[in-house]
Image: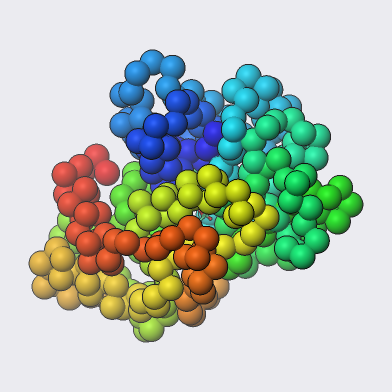
Amino acid sequence: MVTGGAGFIGSHLVDGLLNAGTEHVTVVDTFFLGSEANLRTAGRRSTGTLSIYREDAGDHVLMSEILDIEKPEVVFNLATKALLYSFLNPSGACQVNLSIALTLCELLRKGASTAWCTCPVPRSTAPRAMCRWTRITRCWPRPPTRPGRRQRISPWHRTFGCSIWTWSRSVPSTTTGHARTKGCSAAVVPLTIKRILANEQPVVEGDGTQTRDLIYVEDTVRALVAAATTPEARGLTMNVASGIETRIGDLVERICKVMGWTGGIRTDDRRRADVHRHMADVALASAMLGELSTTSLDEGLERTVDWYRRQGSEA
Ligand SMILES: NC(=O)c1ccc[n+]([C@@H]2O[C@H](COP(=O)([O-])OP(=O)(O)OC[C@H]3O[C@@H](n4cnc5c(N)ncnc54)[C@H](O)[C@@H]3O)[C@@H](O)[C@H]2O)c1
């Protein structure tokens, strides 16, 4: 099961799981930001391979019923109202993201499924044997939800012995790759590509020295699937990232180069909540899951640009 499976990483994960021979994948997504078009490739497979629920992963009753019907082996939680939405509606983002986490925690506590979904907290005491669910990935709009998340999730670990996994900040890092993204929630890579395709100047917010640890989406997916199929990974927190810092200014210049854009770059105000540096320590994840970032930044950008070019105005 992939919650948020119609979104960017989620839809690539659905394709990755099916390509790897998974018999059946269930998607739960409100389609708030996700798109049916992102699931088009998966939907072309034989009947019965993919179930799609246009539902809220934070609805306890519904999720309990869906889990009962689908009985997934693994739940990957990628449903979120992500970072950029939290700038528009911080309390709404908090509420949605927490309700999804609480729903999954409660279903974990009640043993509603044989799936494992990740949520481990302190590694030293996490009773791994009880970890039927291990949450594979989720990240939060960092500024508003970080404190709330920790306070609310830790009792499931402390009191009930559930293995709760909190991702560190940079997980799963900034992911490059293609997807149909809606409006203001698009990130720097698709925004830059789309601007250039529309013959508009790309934009760098701030002085461009802010850095991100970039990883190509198919590498992210491979790591998530590897984590789900590596028993020793249960209960651990791992950074799915490249371990390489890239300046946003350089990233935009590289996209311009890949696309042959010579019309200059516009600068805009820095986003106030922007994190200045991102670089993940990938030692644990690499040791556990193998090499993470096998696609170079330029190769990932070329593939992404190529995809947007082929989609034209549909993207
Ligand atoms: N894309 C990145 O670069 C990046 C970087 C770091 C962390 N992450 C994290 O990875 C996860 C997936 O990110 P993404 O880029 O694929 O985001 P996305 O916005 O493309 O996908 C999230 C999906 O969740 C769906 N959704 C929202 N609320 C829902 C709800 N209540 N119930 C069910 N579905 C709901 C949306 O419709 C969307 O399809 C998120 O937790 C995000 O914070 C992503």
Rendered view: 191 above or below 77: below
- In the rendered view of the protein, which quadrant contains the C terminus? top left
For this orientation, the residue located farthest to the right is: 159
On screen, residue 102 above or below 301: above
Q: Which residue occupies 48% across, 61% down?
A: 240
Q: Nearer the viewer, residue 90 or 81?
A: 81
> Relative to the observer, which residue lies in front, 152 or 240?
240
Q: Which of 274/152 is in front? A: 152
Residue 223 horizontal/vertical position (percent): 45, 54
Instruction: Judge from the rendering whether residue 277 lies leftward or rightward of residue 55; answer left or right.
Output: left
Query: Can the viewer see residue 89 in this picture?
Result: no
| Residue placed furthest toward the top | 47
Task: Residue at 53% x, 26% y: name it.
Answer: 53
Identify which residue is drawn at 28% across, 78% down: 250
Q: Is residue 80 above or below residue 113?
A: below
The answer to which image quadrant residue 165 occupies is bottom right
| Image quadrant containing the N terminus | top right
Quadrant of res 22: top left
Residue at image position (79%, 52%) is: 127
Viewer-proximal residue among 151 and 230: 230
Label tally: 0
Q: Position of residue 123 (x, y in %)?
A: 73, 63
* Residue 36 coordinates in the image, percent (x, y): 39, 31
Q: Is residue 241 visible?
A: yes
Residue 235: which quarter of the image? bottom right
Give the image location of residue 216, x and y in percent.
35, 58
Indicate how the structure is coloured in the image: rainbow
